[in-house]
Image: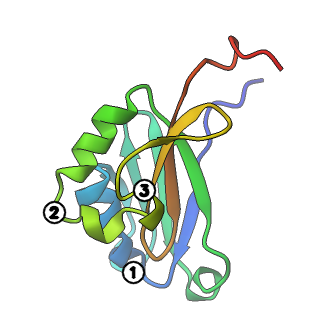
Amino acid sequence: MQLLRFLPSFQYADSDEALPFWIDYLGFRIVHDEGPGKLHVVHRKGVSVMLETNEEYAQQLSPLIRLETDDIAALWAELKSKPEHERYVHDRWVSGPEMRPWRAQEFAVQDEGVCVVFQQWELSFDEQVT
C-alpha cells in the first residue's frame, strides 16, 4: 500500500470567493464543481486542492500549506507578473523569495482562507545530512 498524494481541503465562508486566488492568480483549473457556493476541486500539474463552503470552519484558524517547486524563481516571476499579485503576496515576501534557516528558498501568498508557502530546497532530502 502506498500513500499517493496529499489533498488539502480548505474551508471558506463562500468557496466561490476563493476561485480568483486559485484559478486566476495561482493558475489552477477547476476539475470538479458542485455549483455556486459549494465544493470545488482545483488542480495544477499533480497538485489538487478542495475548496469547500463552510462558514463555521472558515472562522476558525486559517490553514498554512507548503508546496515544493523545482524553480522558485520562475514561479515568483509568474505570480509577480499578475495584476492581483500585490493583493495576494504575503507582507514578508514583497521583495521575493528568501533563503530560510532550514535551507529552502521560500515565499508566501495568501487570501482570506489559506496561506500558501512555496519552497525550493537547497538539497534534496536524500542529500541532506542530519
> Circle 3 is placed at which residue position?
93
Give the left or right position of residue 58, taking residue 14 as reference.
right
Label 2: element kind: loop
* Residue at (29% x, 33% y) in the render: 74
The quarter of the picture where the C terminus appears is top right
Image: 54 above or below 49: below
Image location (x, y in percent) of residue 67 = 52, 42
Give the left or right position of residue 83, taking residue 103 as reference.
left
> Circle 1 is placed at which residue position?
37
Residue 49 got which mark? none
- Which-is-in-front pick, marks 3 and 1? 3
- Which-is-in-front pick, marks 2 and 1? 2
Nearest to the observer: residue 9 or residue 119: 119
Label 1: element kind: loop
Nearest to the observer: residue 22 or residue 105: 105
Residue 83 got which mark? 2
Mark 2 is on which residue type? Pro
